[in-house]
Amino acid sequence: MIKEFKVKTPLYSKCIEVPSVIQNATGIHILSRFIKSIIFTTDVVVIKNNNADAIMAVYPFTPQPILSHALATVANMPLMVGIGGGTTQGDRVVELALDAEFQGVLSVVLNAPIDNNTLLAVRKAIEIPIIVSVVSTDKIEERLRNGADILNVCAGRDTIKVIKYIRDRYPDVPIIATGGGSDKLIEATIDAGANAIVYTPPTTTQLMKDLMATYRT
């Protein structure tokens, strides 16, 4: 067996590491990238200091091009950026999708409430993959028929049930899913059929709190 080497320096040795169990996922080839682990954040400090394969940047405000531009500038790994689908609908979503593609993001993410007409319009407008978030087993066929390339399952306690439903009926559809807060839950999510896992990291506030506790000892 070839030995694995790790090269670090004192100032750059700290980073947020995604759970190693995620490496058990099969992964998804998205354009020229192979993705297993996705970190869910819009924090530029976290974006710059983690070992995930990709960033998913979705936030609870109306998407704006300036925010996508800022995230794309900071990210040194593939970026999946939210372009609406909840409060933001219609032509604005299409324009945001085009702008995101021009910024060089890997894919765009549409929230679960997106209407199928807007989804189809985005599909006709851009060439990069479209990720559609799903929170239940409803409308799966409609999402796929109208342009979803990847399904992002974020159904809370029903996540594993929804993954199994999709995997049983659509064996060739790539699935991203939120893995939960423990290795056991992540493993169960992978076993259910998720190809890549979204990991939510601790906040910088929590990390700073832990660091200050260390400084005070």
Image: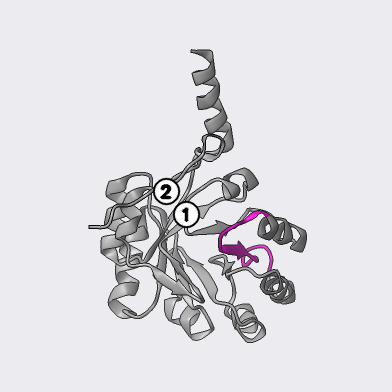
| Magenta-colored stretch includes residue 132 | no
Residue highlighted by disc 1: 52
Q: Residue sitting at 53 percent across and 66 percent down?
A: 112
Q: Residue sitting at 51 percent across and 48 percent down?
A: 50
Foreground of the two, 151 or 50: 50
22 vs 136: above or below: above
Foreground of the two, 112 or 96: 96
Q: Which secondary structure, mark 1?
A: loop
Report the predominant secondary structure element of the magenta stretch.
loop
Residue type, numbered disc 1: Ala
Residue highlighted by disc 2: 18
Residue type, numbered disc 2: Val
Query: How far apart in space, not on screen, are marks 1 and 2 (Cα)?
Result: 6 Å
Q: Position of residue 84 (x, y in %)?
A: 64, 65
Disc 2 residue crowd, few under 14, some 14–19, many 20+, Cα 10 Å: many
Q: Verify CB contact (< 8 Å) between mark 1 and mark 2.
A: yes
Q: Residue sitting at 53 percent across and 82 percent down?
A: 147
Question: In the rendered structure, which segment of residues is drawn in magenta?
Answer: 74-88
In which quadrant of the rendered image does the N terminus lie?
A: bottom left
- The answer to whether residue 62 shows anywhere in this view is no
Q: Where is residue 45 in the image (x, y as percent from the top left)?
A: 62, 43
Locate residue 191: give its quadrant.
bottom left
